[in-house]
Amino acid sequence: MAVATAVGLRCRECGKEYEDGPINVCENDFAPLEVVYDYDLVKRELTRNSIGKRAFNMWRYRELLPEQEPISGFNTGGTPLYHAKRLGERLGGFKNLYLKYDGVCAPSLSFKDRVVAVSIARARRFGFKTVGCASTGNLANAVAAQAAQAGMKAVVLIPKDLEPAKVVNSQVYGATLVKIDGHYDDVNRLCSEIAADAKIGIVNVNLRAYYAEGSKSMGFEIMEQLGWRAPDNIVTCMAGGSLINKLSKAIQEFEKLGLLDKAPKTRFWGAQAAGCNPITAAIKTGTDVIRPVKEPRTIARSIAIGNPADGYFASRLCLDSGGGGDDVSDAEIRDGMRLLAESEGLFTETAGGVTVGTFAKLARAGRIDKNETTVLCITGQGLKTIDALMEPGVLPDAPTIKPTLGEFRDLKLG
Ligand SMILES: *Cc1c(COP(=O)(O)O)cnc(C)c1O
Ligand SMILES: [Zn+2]
């Protein structure tokens, strides 16, 4: 039986407390709100033993989520953690390198299914009949798919130039897709105005505090899969900067609940595309002051947010944890996608290419210890962004031959 452990909202800046509701900023200072839990209650219900008896998906840690009964995303999460031996070798002898592969996260093949599963259940509780989002693609896919599962209406807003696969993957579920003539930041601003009407539950605007909690499940799974340990390093790409913060919160919560064998001291490394790097630009100069990028230009569209909502917290986390950050060019993103595919047989989208490419850069610069345990968060699926690899000269032209042994031998493939 579910025990309600989430007890309200609190401002991350001034600490003012709020009752549960579709609100996302503090009325004093406009700072983001965060879900508050009764950790004594959580501790009673959530033990290694109770977790171990549940199905391997994100709901096995339900007492640390603001919703405990899914109405969509029933088997979301529970994605594999692979020991990346060949990739580790290719990058110069990383023996304890792991990949958290959310390219197979159900139902819509990105980690965004985790945040949507939580926020759709909240939307229903608050009485919304329609859910929506401001999206760079994956969120639209997840909202559309899970609204269908929950029997709700969905309206998803995206910048007009997204990859065809992300467009189709939103419309096929029956969602209403609206393309905005502008960048993600324009889409997001419009969604804030729509949310003010309070008729649509916009998962990453008026439900953002709840939404963001879903990302913690990726962190919980990583620690359990490592044998109740936090890794020494986590590398992940960043868009709004929410995921990286929630991975850190996940580790703090497991520590607080006594679920870990030893005290964690994880360093966080943030990755972005050079063409849209507001957070890593700050990290690289040692500051938490985010200067928005006005005209994002990168093939990594799913993480192209010029004005990141949690950028300040993300840069502080990377700096204060002893980690850091870096960004990569479009060519390095493609190299990262191919490196992962060729060494581990995993196909990730451009955002995953950013993570792998940035890790390769950090590794070459000797910034991450080869003997430590490092987890790369591979957050999306390569089949959604094949256009990035279809440009001339990226992959070889495949020869076409007559079905004869002679022509095949002429290819001299050995
Ligand atoms: C949205 C997204 C991210 C980053 O999310 P934030 O929490 O906004 O930093 C990373 N990878 C993929 C594939 C995404 O779609
Ligand atoms: Zn406040």
Image (spheres, rainbow, N blue to C red):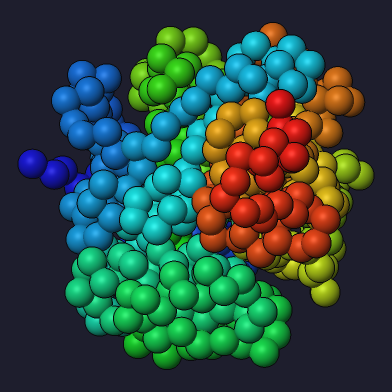
Q: Is residue 337 left or right of residue 384?
A: right
Could you tell me which residue is drawn at 56 percent across and 34 percent down? 345
Q: Is residue 329 left or right of residue 186?
A: right
Could you tell me which residue is drawn at 62 percent across and 74 percent down? 162
Q: Position of residue 186 (x, y in %)?
A: 67, 82
Q: Nearer the viewer, residue 305 or 176?
A: 176
Q: Position of residue 111 (x, y in %)?
A: 47, 50
Q: How many marks can you see? A: 0
Could you tell me which residue is drawn at 68 percent across and 20 percent down? 88
Q: Quadrant of residue 253?
A: top left
Quadrant of the rendering where the C terminus is positioned: top right
Q: Position of residue 228 (x, y in %)?
A: 41, 17
Quadrant location, ligand no. 1: bottom right
Against 260, residue 144 (above or below) is below
Against 218, residue 349 (above or below) is below
Q: Is residue 334 left or right of residue 187?
A: right
Could you tell me which residue is drawn at 46 percent across and 28 percent down? 81
**Residue 286 appears in the figure:** yes
**Residue 15 appears in the figure:** no
Q: Nearer the viewer, residue 14 or 95?
A: 95
Q: Quadrant of residue 232?
A: top right
Against 374, residue 121 (above or below) is below
Farthest residue toward the left?
Answer: 1
Q: Position of residue 389 (x, y in %)?
A: 70, 56
Q: Nearer the viewer, residue 346 or 194?
A: 346
Quadrant of the rendering where the N terminus is positioned: top left
